[in-house]
Image (cartoon, grey):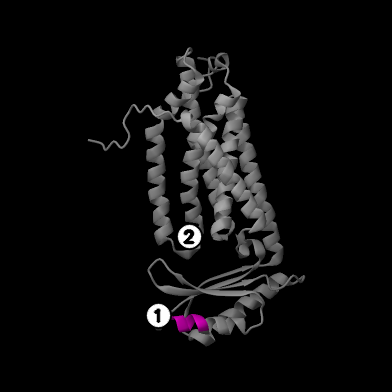
Amino acid sequence: MALQLIPNETKIDFVRFRSIAAVASSLLLIGSIVAFFTIGLNFGIDFRGGVTVEVGPGTGEPFTEQSLTDARDAVGGLGLGDVRVQNITNPGGDEGIVAFIEAVTDSDDGDRRQNEVASQVQEALRAALGENISIQRVDVVGPTVSGELVERGIIALVVAIALMLAYIWFRFEWQFSIGAILALTHDVILTIGVFTVTQLEFTLAIIAALLTIIGYSMNDTVVIYDRVRENLRKFKQMPLKDVINLSVNQTLSRTIMTSLTTLLAVVALFVFGGSVLRGFSFALIWGVIVGTYSTVYIASPFLLMTGVKRDWSENKSLDGQKA
């Protein structure tokens, strides 16, 4: 017998809490925007340019606090400018040390200079920690490339949202498309806000996570919108508020099960994926939660503000054909 977490017929009045949700979302959006312009994101070398060198103990003794101090002294003594050296924990539980050196030059040959710096840092770490250390990761991003990545990352997000708008507008009525885009924008802004507040490193992987969040949230929204459209044809005299509540309740089991199974995967990625995937997996965890929330409390209740023509719904079917 299958495990059933959610009853087949729930009767939760989701729309009743739309005002509370609107106020909460507005405050969070304002807070995220203010934090972005006052604190700013902690951009990784993908967007700032620079060098990252990650090392492990190799065949030698595990790293200690003294190892971290020695590494900081060695890399700091190279005179490369803003340098960060910190401990990390790898998936197997082994301690490692990673050095971040931000853009060291803005000269025309900056890309070549970055590679030279990467070699210097590796030599300095070997001298401080021993020749048998394991170089686990070396990332080099020149100032030219980093500038292009910022531009392309922004373009990717804008194009993704625009295409989603076009898709929903084509498949549904304009009220549906505006509600869906509001939910997507809400998710993106809150995700950027949480990265600003936590100061987790914002890299290209986070852009990939944002695009994934957009797709996940849109899929969730389309499922509920399809049910709303079907119920508008089925219950012609039912108030729109009740139609929305009915539709959300009918898809609630699917929504929760999809969110839970997705969370199981990304939480495992967060716990066991190591430092390289930590920001990406955290963004997905946050995105699944906030995406589910925005679908239920932003995209769906927005239909009440604009209204949906029932005669329009009668001319459409779930397959885009006439009813």
- Please state the horizontal and vertical placement of residue 209, each as a whole percent of the image: 53, 51
Q: Is residue 49 visible?
A: yes
* SS at circle 2: helix
Left or right of 239 in this view: 45: right
Q: Main secondary structure of the magenta part?
A: helix
Residue toward you, 110 or 252: 252
Q: Which residue is mark 1?
A: 62
Percent across and percent down for residue 233 are 48, 16
What amino acid type should be assigned to the residue bearing mark 2? Arg
State which region is magenta.
63-69
Please tell me which residue lies in front, 149 or 81. Answer: 81
Residue ID for mark 2 = 278
Mark 2 and mark 1: span between their CA atoms? 22 Å
Q: Residue furthest left?
A: 1
Q: Quadrant of residue 315?
A: top right
Q: Residues within 10 Å of mark 2 (few under 14, many from 20)?
A: many
Compared across the picture, whether 82 is left or right of 294 comes to: right
